[in-house]
Image (spheres, rainbow, N blue to C red):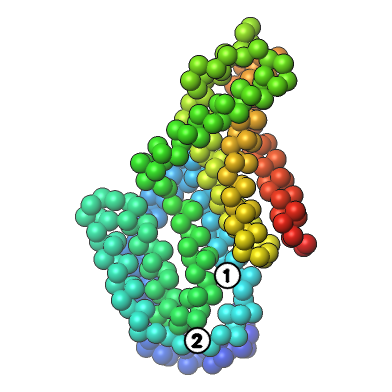
Amino acid sequence: MSQARAERMFGVPVSRILKNPLTWVSTLTLAAICVAYLNVFAYWKYYWFLRDGYYSHGVLVPFLALYMVWMRREEIRQTAIRPSMWGIPVVALALALRVLGHLTQSSTIASISFIILVYGIVGLLAGWRHARLVWFPILFLGFMMPVPATIFDEISQPAQEWSTIIANGILKTIGYETRRIGNVILIPGGFDLDVGVPCSGFKMLVSMATFAFFFAYYIGVALWRQALLVLLALPLALVINGLRIALIGIVGTKYGEQAGYTFHDWSGYLVLVVAFAVLFQLGRWLGWQR
């Protein structure tokens, strides 16, 4: 970035910014905060890149959040920067929660504290008008964080059951004489399906919810239409996951057990594309014209 362009962006000479002690204090403070959250960042990274994990979408969330901020760049540029000392109590609360999360070994509390911290820093350095403009992208960062185990169990078990019911219904509809026992679908003379937790649909639910919130913000329709899009995305995720399970059963029955397992490994990407395509069509139906 050229010096002239930087001066137009900030409205003051860059040299004055660099000579301002507050600039260096803020930089050192942010560096110290990053160090304080290193363990939290490492925790997120572990779950993002965990093989067969549920949060591989998490690595994209910060970039999507930044894009949402960029979408409002004109409003942000036209809003005067008015740092507020009231951001200090918010930052202090966030750091207190970080300490509490460390003492109680609660990654959830530590993760929540990060969101509060970002919001407080924006208010402190830019002012609350800026904070109001970017509150949703900041809150959106929560999608990159693993949910607590209790919430995971509460969501994954019903999702597992519904995915099994939907898959069994699809197979019966196209002529397979299946029998469902709990979360197991028996296909006479075919490839039996044991719908375990990894196939419960939780990953699809989280991924779809993440993208649905981003997409609803992106299309910029009325608030009730945005909420409706998000609500429709959740049952859509279960239906798509049930379709995937049914397809695994069909492939395994027609082409053998090994083919079924192979299709199981890469079919998640296929059905995710289908889910996104359907979500785009829902956006059109709700008034998205772009």
**Residue that lies at the very extreme toward the left in this rendered image:** 103
- Among the 4 quarters of the image, the one containing residue 278: top right
Residue 85: percent from left, percent from top = 35, 84
Q: Residue at x 24, y 59 (%)?
A: 100
In the displayed structure, 172 sits above or below 28; it is above
Mark 2 residue type = Ile
CA distance for labels 1 and 2: 16 Å
Q: Residue furthest top?
A: 189
As drawn, which residue projects farthest toward the right? 289
The tag earlier along the polypeptide, 1 or 2, is 1
Query: Position of 106 compared to 58: left or right?
Result: left
The residue at 44%/76% (across/down) is: 122
Helix, strand or loop for disc 2: loop
Q: Position of residue 196 (x, y in %)?
A: 48, 26
- Asked if the residues shown at circle 1 and circle 2 are in contact, with their CB atoms under 8 angstroms apart, the answer is no
Helix, strand or loop under label 1: helix
Q: Locate the N terminus by quadrant.
A: bottom right
Relative vertical location of residue 147 with respect to residue 72 in this rendering, above or below? above
Front residue of 40 and 141: 141
Above or below: residue 130 compared with residue 268: below
Where residue 79 sits: x, y (%)?
56, 85
Residue for badge 2: 81
Residue 198 seen in the current view: no
Relative to 52, is 283 on the left or the right?
right
Q: Mark 1 is on which residue type? A: Val
Between residue 157 and residue 265, name the one nearer to us. Answer: 157
Question: Is residue 85 positioned above or below 157 on the image?
Answer: below
Q: Is residue 54 visible?
A: yes
> Tag 1: Cα neighbours inside 10 Å, few (<14), some, or many (≥20)?
some
Please tell me how crowded label 2 is: few (under 14), some (14-19), or many (20+) other residues with Cα within 10 Å. some
Residue 69 marker: 1
Pick the front one: 72 or 45: 72
